[in-house]
Amino acid sequence: MITLRDVYRARRMISNYLPRTPLIYSRQLSRKLGFDVYLKLENLQPIRAFKVRGGLYYALVKKDEAQRKGLVTASTGNHAQSIAYAGKTIGARVIIVMPNGVSRVKVEAVRDLGAEVVFHGNVFDETLDYAMKLAEREGMLFVHSINEPLLYPGVGTMHLEVLEDLPDVDVVINPIGGGSGASSAVIVYKSVDPSIRVIGVQAEGAPSVYLSLKEGRLVSTGYAKTVAEGLATARAYELPFSILRGKIDDVVLVSDDEMLRAIKELLISAGQVAEPAGAAALAAAIKLREQLIGKRVVIMVTGGNIDPEFLKSILERY
């Protein structure tokens, strides 16, 4: 069981290494949408994504073993950078297994942090299975990007900052890929005030968590058809499902088109660069605008790792 106390413990450990990200009020978005919009800018982290919080906490807790054995993980991008950054911080070898087709920006970012990159599989689950076998073969520590409990307290520190900066928040919208961000949101907000609504967001083409919560059981779709790499998971996992079930208030599905439009909106209205998964919460807020009128809504901008040419094409298209 992961608790609020664990999140405070994580904050104490990682605060010497990571900056506190700003929570900014957007007048333009608030005026356009009809409710108070606050943006939590995790795209301003050193790796431009929230996951660095979890990876660093894991590495600090496991420091001695990690330095001795090294770390292996599987990721579509931001978790990879998180573990690469953590390994560089503590001086540990890191191998990242990535599926084919991951954006060039994310691959280069991982290599720039000193990690070794291995490509395997076309969907995350194939990549994950290979990474686990590789870690066992090499005698290295395997860091599961979703079912590793030590990631969640670190990730939860971003929600702790939200509460400290905006104690009277009404609604928090957080994307769901594997589920660490939304799960840690539930842990933090529901521990402090159960009336704070937590809304998750999945891609229409990767709805495994949405379906799992709806059906009350773990669902594997076997596919992840979305431009949002950070949301491209083909199945739900035990740990986040156990945390989210019965506690998250809602999960919304958004299309790739809605996320791409939200990327442009974030750039124009708030001057912030987001990747598709990082703009998913805004896409959901736009979709739910009638339900949110008059509320104080925090939109988690979870990542900003996007290929410049892809961003250019979005701006031209929309």
Image (cartoon, rainbow, N blue to C red):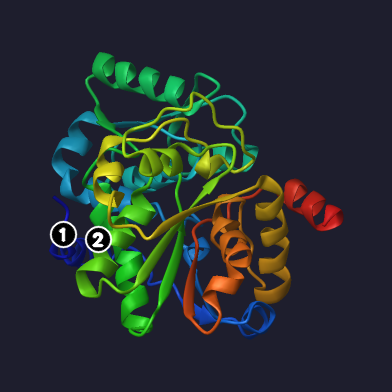
Residue pointed to by mark 2:
187
Residue pointed to by mark 1:
3
Q: Residue furthest front?
A: 215
Characterize the local packing of mark 1: few (<14), some (14-19) or many (20 or more) Cα atoms within 10 angstroms: some
Image location of residue 232, percent across then percent down: 52, 37
Q: Are marks 1 and 2 in contact (CB under 8 Å)?
A: yes
The quarter of the displayed image where residue 265 is located: bottom right
Q: At numbered mark 1, what does the secondary structure look like: helix, strand or loop? A: loop
Instruction: Say which amino acid is labelled 1.
Output: Thr
257 and 13: which one is in front?
A: 257
The residue positioned 39% from the left and 25% from the top of the image is: 128
- Name above or below for residue 243 compared with residue 41: above
Does 142 sit left or right of 173 as displayed?
A: left
How many discs appear? 2
The residue positioned 44% from the left and 35% from the top of the image is: 75
- Name above or below for residue 150 compared with residue 121: below
Image location of residue 80, percent across then percent down: 43, 40
Q: At numbered mark 2, what does the secondary structure look like: helix, strand or loop? A: helix
